[in-house]
Image (cartoon, coloured by chain):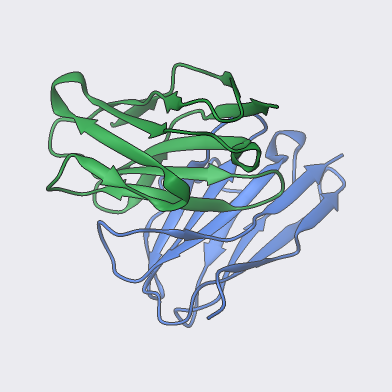
Chain colours: A blue, B green
Amino acid sequence: GAGVSQSPRYKVAKRGQDVALRCDPISGHVSLFWYQQALGQGPEFLTYFQNEAQLDKSGLPSDRFFAERPEGSVSTLKIQRTQQEDSAVYLCASSLVATYNEQFFGPGTRLTVL
Amino acid sequence: AQSVTQPDIHITVSEGASLELRCNYSYGATPYLFWYVQSPGQGLQLLLKYFSGDTLVQGIKGFEAEFKRSQSSFNLRKPSVHWSDAAEYFCAVIEYGNKLVFGAGTILRVKS
């Protein structure tokens, strides 16, 4: 079956623009995660959904970052008024059950803010 | 909060040589530990995981890892490295049941 897919794969934005990043998890997976990976670093947690409920958004760096998963499947990460420090790879992952389970990662979206 | 330390930023080994990548974690209870590999432009692929039971865990592509509670370590090993193993490797631990906390990664270079 298909894995986690993300679109676009690459995004270039001018500072101040809004961007939307999409994640299609593996069908039937309950949990969905967003991570941010800056150049040369490990991924860092942003937010977590269980079905359509956003249970943890403690990793979102500012109120410019917003994520949603309205029907419990596809998720969108939105960044408003992008800044240069938002440049990173944004990784989406899904897992079959809610806790203590393997996460399957998508290829990521590389965001470059000029 | 949990943390994961990967002391080696870069490691270079000769093709056919053995490999050990180090990982140390800080966590009070029994940790749920993972090793992921990331090739350039690719997402993270799970190599192996430790949840409980046998402390020596076998994974894909000939990798294994050993959980040592006394040393708070979960080192990744491979007896004979192939050129295709060149990639970045991340150790991670689950925090609060769901989110992953990653180390900074170790870049493996394989020389022929």
The residue sitting at 76% across, 56% down in the picture is A18
User: Which is more toward the observer, B84 or A54?
Assistant: B84
For image coordinates 64% across by 57% down, the residue present is A107
Name the residue: 50% across, 17% down: B8
Q: Residue furthest top?
A: B7
Q: From this viewpoint, is residue B70 visible?
A: yes
Camera-side residue of B9 and A14 = B9
**Which quadrant of the structure image shows residue A108?**
bottom right
Q: x, y (%) of residue B33?
A: 29, 42
Q: Quadrant of the C terminus of chain B?
A: top right
Residue B20, percent from left and from top:
42, 25
Q: Quadrant of the N terminus of chain B?
A: top left
Q: Is residue B89 above or below residue B22?
A: below
Q: In the current view of this chain or complex, which residue is farthest to the front?
A: B16
Please state if A62 lies on the left or on the right of B46 as rendered.
Answer: right
Query: Quick check: A18 left or right of B104?
Result: right
Query: How many circles with numbers are drawn on the protein?
Result: 0
Residue A76 horizontal/vertical position (percent): 60, 67
Residue A16, placed above or below residue A107: above
| A82 displayed left or right of B86 | right
Q: Say if residue A80 shows up in the picture.
A: no
Q: Residue at x 45, y 65 (%)?
A: A94
Residue A44 is situated, as x and y percent measured from the top left of the image, at 49, 40
